[in-house]
Amino acid sequence: MWNAPIKLILWDLDDTLWRGTLADGDAVALFDQRAEMVRAFNARGVVSSICSKNDFDAAKARLEAFGLWDEFVFPHIAFTPKAEAIRGIIADMQLRAANTLFIDDNPHNLAEVRHALPEIQTLDATAADADEQLAGLLAIQTGTRSRVAEYRILEAKKRDRGAVEGQSNEAFLRASGLCACAPFIMDNLEFVPRIAELINRANQLNYTQSRVDAAQLERDIINVTRHDSWSIFAWDKYGRYGLVGFVMYDRVEQKLVHFTFSCRAMHMGLEAYALGKIRGNWPDADFSALDGRFSRVSPDWIEDHGFDEPDVRAAIRAERSGQLAGEAGIRIMFDCQSGGIAHYSQYRPAIDFDNNPRLFALRMMDDDSYKAQHFPPFLVYGATVDYLDVRWPGKWHLLERGVYQKCVLRLCIHLIENDLRMLVVLPPEDAPIEKYRLGLNHSPERARIFNAIWRQMARENPGRIFLLEVADLLDSYEEMADVTHFHPSLLQKIAAQMDLWVYGVLTAGSGDAAAA
């Protein structure tokens, strides 16, 4: 019977949430089942508000006595017409009438609201099956977290905005200290469930009208040779908004795949902020389809933060998990492939992984910049990324003349001096020629030369350096986009081998692990 997903339930009080009329002096009694419904809907992400013709202080006191007041956001309790009050609540919460359910016992009130807001959904509280309908609505909710705290932030902002007459929206945003962060490509894998939920729930600000399957979204994010993706997180002095947007750009077809935002992001400039991220990589991208749909003014009031900032990253991850992550014991150093490997590992909570600009590069052993890097006890290194000339500015022409081997030796010394262990993932040497990146001098010949250096180092440092040959894992070369970019099936295999390696070192000792 529901015409659209319900995101907000508006409750009348008298003879709807409680039995009796408060203004008439009745000793009102709570409908316990409906009170529990309010709590249950909140837990599943459907918030409740109040629209009631009553004295505000008296109604609030009664709800506090019932232990229910804090379950509601944006309550309107006053002797005013309900249609306009509800229109204001919906606007303040940045929702749509179509996603709102209004519950009242008075047929006149229900008819008035439907007339003013034809898309709103209504329920007669006196209907014999009213509670059954609410139970059915609850049963189809798939959300797993309360959104009350998010709307408390909007309440606080509404109060402050109303206290300063004549202030423009941009001035208010500047005063609010709005900050944003846009994790890029593989960093988004840990947010896939929340991103999928956002895309599939959003209507008003789903500019591409896309829907996703979480597994396919995961594969699309991993496919970095085709897709660039950013998730958008925001916070200001009022609080943290969590993940409020996700955008994906198809590099091949040069078009938006996803461009979706939460209603909490409305009128904050975050859409323009996201476009700026895409234009940073694709300055000629055509966004004319978005003309007139939101402000394109450059949001200079947004303070941009990088996901490489440790405090920012920890806070965003804490939003998702509810607790701060402990120090990682494993680091995957495989450039943009690192996150994919981490995603498939059983040790994911213990893993830190590289993603630009958080990167280890072998050239750091040449200029001592490696000393600023963090190296936990277990390291997984994708040697193939440093077979590219572009990773060696000013030194690429010297790689085969001793620079590469010198850096490998220095890294090995660092491992020994700090009691570290490293699994080195080596690229194939006999792949089809089109799989190599010849324009950057990553050729079969270079792969053979540099792989041989690592094999020698592993022989000379048993129990310290371990090798994983990609060629031994491949069922088909179609599992690689190229020698530095792998498809999910190959990333899963590498993750499985990494897990076996870590388990072997932890349980059997490094010598037995090397033999395995």
Image (tube, helix red, strand yellow):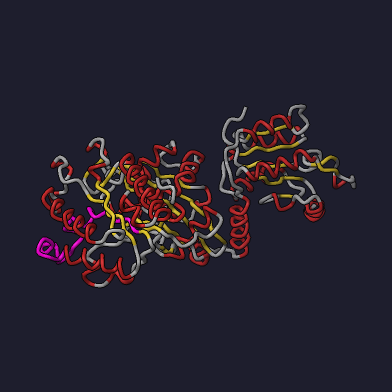
What residue lies at 56% left-to-right and 61% top-to-bottom?
239
Q: Is residue 280 visible?
A: no
- The answer to which image quadrant residue 356 occupies is bottom left
Q: Which image quadrant for residue 249?
A: top left
* Position of residue 111 in the picture relative to residue 212 (left or right): right
Q: Is residue 131 left or right of residue 253?
A: right
Of helix, strand and loop, which mostly describes the magenta segment? helix
Q: Is residue 359 above or below residue 109?
A: below
Residues in magenta, as a range: 379-404
Picture mark count: 0
Q: Closest to the observer: 98 or 418?
A: 418
Q: Quadrant of the N terminus?
A: top right
Residue 52 placement (x, y as % from top left): 75, 45
Q: Does residue 10 lie above or below 360 as drawn? A: above
Please name the residue shown 71% across and 34% down the image. 110
- Frontmost residue, 145 versus 492: 492
In the image: residue 197, left or right of residue 30 = left
Is residue 59 found inside the magenta-colored segment of the image? no
Q: Position of residue 148 (x, y in %)?
A: 63, 51
Q: Nearer the viewer, residue 148 or 494?
A: 494
In the picture, residue 180 is in which quadrant?
Answer: bottom left
* x, y percent for residue 261: 46, 47
- Decide whether residue 383 is among the magenta residues: yes
